[in-house]
């Protein structure tokens, strides 16, 4: 009697291309393409759901199981954002191919938006005694046609934006002047100016981001306290980075005497103290981590001052606990 032994075949995935280059693209928000593949082995090919980098999405594999000789498709979409950039996204495709269990696919796009803003972010700091500061941005229509600004809209009334006058009426580029006035107490700010163009007045064509600081009579350096430590259950606290104190310099910028009091931390295990350095005009805040928390935690260190406009100052505080 003869017995026939059935030998199971081996699957093998083959993509027609692993790099999809869209070349130069403009005036669109997304681009889409399809990676095509085939089972060139003699066994059944089974694929897992693909994994993508951020900003790239994939549709369902068509199909995810292929007989020998069958073909499939992997549709994908890349989000381009709103700024000039060379965009590169990656897709990982896993299968039961024993020789190539993972295939890495790449989608490339050289994107130029219809409107190009430079810079996209303005940094504006107002030192003590300064009432206003001005920053500039250049805005260009990349297809060379006339750029017509319908309006500029600031997020706060103390920020004003205007288009600088030009001698030419057919320009594709304009210069935008952004003025920030001192308004209210000393603080940090994070605001924006929206740009609306002719023919697109309901939604902004671009945003200029404006951030900085209105400085007062008291200045800090640094302006945040941060620890990154290993879980105390895994590593003894002795010899850890947690033992290194963090320091903040507190300075009187107008040369007047300062009084500081009621120094507090909202995080248990953080010990803080004020060390006078220069006749009431310069202090050092020293923070020590005496107890590592069980998990990452955020809070503040605060103190009161004798300056009316900055009667209470808060310093962000973070302890990041890494768990191996």
Image: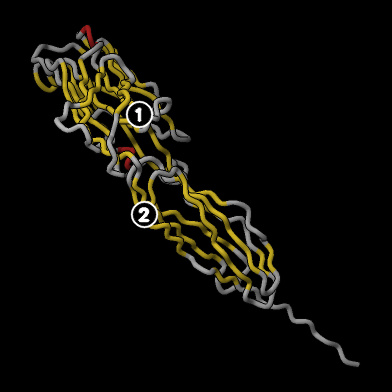
Of 141 and 295, the residue lying toward us: 141
Residue 278: x %, y % from top left: 9, 20
Which residue in the structure is indicated by mark 1? 198
Q: Which mark is residue 63?
A: none
Q: Is residue 19 left or right of residue 178?
A: right
Q: Is residue 258 visible?
A: yes
Characterize the local packing of mark 2: few (<14), some (14-19) or many (20 or more) Cα atoms within 10 angstroms.
few
Local secondary structure at mark 1:
loop
Residue 252: x %, y % from top left: 13, 17
Local secondary structure at mark 2:
strand
Does residue 113 lie above or below 211 as drawn?
below
Residue lying at the far top in this picture: please name it.
Answer: 308
Does residue 20 lie above or below 208 as drawn?
below
Does residue 270 lie above or below 130 as drawn?
below
Q: Which mark is residue 24?
A: 2
Tell me which corner region of the image, top left, top right, bottom left or bottom right, holds residue 267: top left
Q: Earlier in the sequence, mark 2 or mark 1?
A: 2
Tell me which corner region of the image, top left, top right, bottom left or bottom right, holds residue 49: bottom right
For the N terminus, the image quarter is bottom right
Residue 229: x %, y % from top left: 38, 41
Q: Residue at x 53, y 49 (%)?
A: 57
Residue 299: x %, y % from top left: 39, 25
Characterize the local packing of mark 1: few (<14), some (14-19) or many (20 or more) Cα atoms within 10 angstroms.
few
């Amino acid at each position: 009697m003869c017995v026939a032994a059935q030998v199971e075949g081996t699957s093998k995935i083959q993509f027609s291309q692993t790099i999809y280059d869209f070349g130069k693209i403009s005036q669109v928000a997304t681009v889409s393409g399809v990676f095509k593949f085939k089972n060139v082995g003699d066994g059944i090919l089974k694929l897992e759901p693909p994994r993508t980098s951020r900003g790239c999405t994939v549709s369902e594999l068509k199909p995810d199981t292929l007989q020998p000789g069958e073909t499939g498709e992997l549709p994908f979409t890349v989000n381009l954002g709103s700024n000039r950039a060379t965009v590169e996204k990656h897709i990982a495709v896993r299968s039961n191919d024993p020789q190539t269990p993972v295939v890495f696919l790449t989608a490339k796009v050289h994107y130029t938006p219809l409107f190009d803003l430079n810079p996209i972010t303005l940094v504006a700091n107002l030192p003590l005694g300064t009432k206003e500061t001005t920053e500039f941005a250049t805005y260009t229509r990349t297809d060379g046609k006339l750029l017509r600004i319908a309006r500029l809209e600031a997020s706060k009334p103390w920020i004003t934006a205007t288009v600088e006058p030009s001698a030419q009426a057919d320009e594709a580029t304009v210069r935008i002047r952004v003025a920030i006035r001192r308004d209210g107490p000393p603080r940090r700010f994070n605001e924006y100016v929206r740009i609306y163009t002719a023919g697109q007045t309901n939604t902004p064509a671009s945003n200029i981001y404006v951030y900085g600081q209105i400085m007062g009579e008291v200045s800090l350096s640094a302006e945040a306290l941060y620890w990154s430590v290993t879980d105390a259950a895994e590593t003894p606290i002795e010899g850890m980075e947690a033992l290194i104190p963090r320091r903040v310099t507190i300075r009187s910028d107008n040369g007047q005497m300062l009084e500081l009091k009621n120094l507090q931390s909202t995080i248990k295990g953080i010990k803080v103290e004020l060390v006078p350095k220069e006749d009431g005009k310069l202090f050092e805040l020293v923070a020590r981590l005496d107890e590592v928390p069980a998990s990452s935690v955020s809070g503040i260190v605060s103190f009161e001052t004798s300056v009316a406009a900055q009667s209470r100052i808060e310093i962000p505080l973070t302890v990041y606990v890494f768990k191996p």
